[in-house]
Amino acid sequence: MITTDVLSQFGMFQGLPESLLQEIADISTEVSAAKGDFVFREGEKADKLHFLLSGSIALRVKLTSRPESVTVSFVSSPFQSFGWSGVVPPYHYTSSAECDEDSQLLIIPSAPFMKLLENHPESGFKIMQQITVIIADRLRNSRQALLKTL
């Protein structure tokens, strides 16, 4: 079971009211994933937000000019998030997430999470600001990785 203490260690959730952290904990689940497992694949419907508790995840994109995927980012520090596509239209993953090692993940389903943000607009705004920082960082990493492949 995910606790509010664990959630408060994620940058995205720091400073949120304890009551909101509890609501987020109530809809969260912890899952294990083995090395080589895909958490999600590029193009799939995105209906979850993912957080790393332990392990390492490689984010990869397919290029039409190459048969293999290109790694554009690693999520390897505890308390990082990935799978932001679950809360941003058009709700399809823009990369694949593959476990580079056995990993423990926190999963939050998008629909009830977004409902919580609507019900707590001030906190929801802060969380969405954090998500835009993540998106900008991933875009920067993707651009650099793709330039290296050219």
Image (spheres, helix red, strand yellow):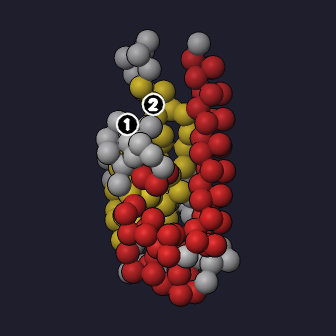
Residue 98: x, y in percent? 40, 43
Residue at 40 percent across and 22 percent down: it is 68
> Residue 87 at x, y = what percent?
46, 54
Answer above or below: position of 102 versus 5. Answer: above
Distance between mark 1 and mark 2 Cα atoms: 7 Å
Q: Which residue is mark 2?
A: 61
Query: Which quadrant is the C terminus positioned in?
Result: top right
Q: Classify mark 1: helix, strand or loop.
A: loop
Relative image position of residue 111 (x, y in whole percent): 37, 63
Question: Which is nearer the N-term, disc 1 or disc 2?
Answer: 1
Crowd rating for badge 1 (residues with CA inside 10 Å; few <14, some 14–19, many 20+): some
State whether residue 121 is above or below residue 69.
below
Give the label on residue 92, or none. none
Q: Which residue is mark 1?
A: 42
Quadrant for residue 125, please give it. bottom right
Q: Residue 48 in the image: state x and y as whole percent.
A: 38, 57
Question: Within 10 Å of the Cα at label 2, are there few (<14), some (14-19), or many (20+) other Cα atoms?
Answer: many
